[in-house]
Image (spheres, rainbow, N blue to C red):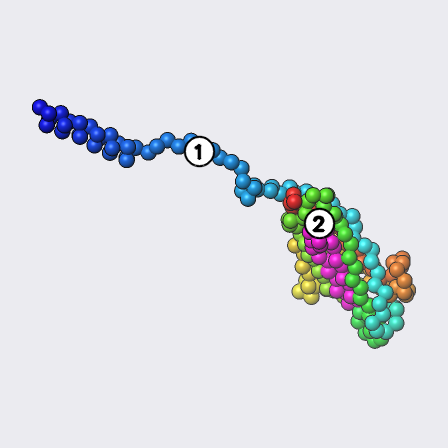
């Protein structure tokens, strides 16, 4: 009888031991916030910048200051970039050259801040167009054109002769080549001079909270 009681006791203790090994203990988990897991959400803004320019190059690279109705051949581009983390900067370049002797020539580069992020924010990304360029020979009375209407604006020039790139940045180029008088400015007053100004499409930026 004692042996039977001892066997039952050992069996009972063994079952309890096995249950303790196979049954997971309930653990109360406390979740604490940790800075390294915080996500800083970006905010999107959209705005229409003011017209960039007009700018008139005054550097004389050759010839005199008059294109004399010969073109000029024009290269121009504009690009947007983030400067210093908090400024949206537009850089504009223009190069104009007479198409025959005496090959009057000029160029200029300008920069303009279009937007400054508010305190506590940086500009993380430009989420719209950032670049546009054009290269063509100006015809008389041609002063402005949209990217889509460039070939029509400059007359008989074929589309294959007009290198043009635009990723949605520009809505209208305003370029004056030959003016009928003196063309290359000798000061910073663009009145009646060769010049460039650009109207932009709405710009979208992603702002990041510091």
Task: Give me the residue at 73% from left, 54% from top.
Answer: 89
- Name the residue furthest top: 1
Q: Main secondary structure of the magenta part?
A: strand
Within 10 Å of disc 1 (Cα), the crowding (few <14, some 14-19, many 20+) is few
Measure the C-alpha gap from mark 1 to mark 2.
42 Å
Residue linked to disc 1: 29
Residue 161 in the image, given as x and y percentages of width and height = 69, 66
Asked whether residue 74 is drawn in magenta, I would say: yes
- Residue 182 visible in rendering: yes
Image quarter hosting the C terminus: top right
Q: Nearer the viewer, residue 41 or 81?
A: 41
Mark 1 / mark 2, whichever is N-terminal = 1
Q: Quadrant of the N terminus?
A: top left
Query: Callout 2: few (<14), some (14-19), or many (20+) C-alpha neighbours within 10 Å?
Result: some
Q: Secondary structure at mark 1?
A: loop
C-beta proximity under 8 Å, tags 1 and 2:
no
Query: Residue 46 at x, y = what percent?
Result: 69, 43
Residue displayed at 84% across by 67% down: 59
Residue depicted at 81% across the width and 54% down the height: 53
Q: Give the residues drawn in magenta, as a range.
A: 70-96
Residue behind mark 2? 86
Q: Which of the pair 13/98 is nearer the observer?
A: 13
Q: Nearer the viewer, mark 1 or mark 2?
A: 1
Query: Whole-percent x and y of residue 68?
Result: 87, 69
Residue farthest toward the bottom in the current orientation of the protein:
101
Q: Residue at 54% of width from left, 40% of height from top?
A: 34
- Viewer-proximal residue, 88 or 59? 88
Asked where in the image residue 67 lies, by quadrant, the reply is: bottom right
Judged left or right of residue 45, residue 139 is right
Helix, strand, or loop for circle 2? loop
Res. 144 visible in picture: no
């Amino acid at each position: 009888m004692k042996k039977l009681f001892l066997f039952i006791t050992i069996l009972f203790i063994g079952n309890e031991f096995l249950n303790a090994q196979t049954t997971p203990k309930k653990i109360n988990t406390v979740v604490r916030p940790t800075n390294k897991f915080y996500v800083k959400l970006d905010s999107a803004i959209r705005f229409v910048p003011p017209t960039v320019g007009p700018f008139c190059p005054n550097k004389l690279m050759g010839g005199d200051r008059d294109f004399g109705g010969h073109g000029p051949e024009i290269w121009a581009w504009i690009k947007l970039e983030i400067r210093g983390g908090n400024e949206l900067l537009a850089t504009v370049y223009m190069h104009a050259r007479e198409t025959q002797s005496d090959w009057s020539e000029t160029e200029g580069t300008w920069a303009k801040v279009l937007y400054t992020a508010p305190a506590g924010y940086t500009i993380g990304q430009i989420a719209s167009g950032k670049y546009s360029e054009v290269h063509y020979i100006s015809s008389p009375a041609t002063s402005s054109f949209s990217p889509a209407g460039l070939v029509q604006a400059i007359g008989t020039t074929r589309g294959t002769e007009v290198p043009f790139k635009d990723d949605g940045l520009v809505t209208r180029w305003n370029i004056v080549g030959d003016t009928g008088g003196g063309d290359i400015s000798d000061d910073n007053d663009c009145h009646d001079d060769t010049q460039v100004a650009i109207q932009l499409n709405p710009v979208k930026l992603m702002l990041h909270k510091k």
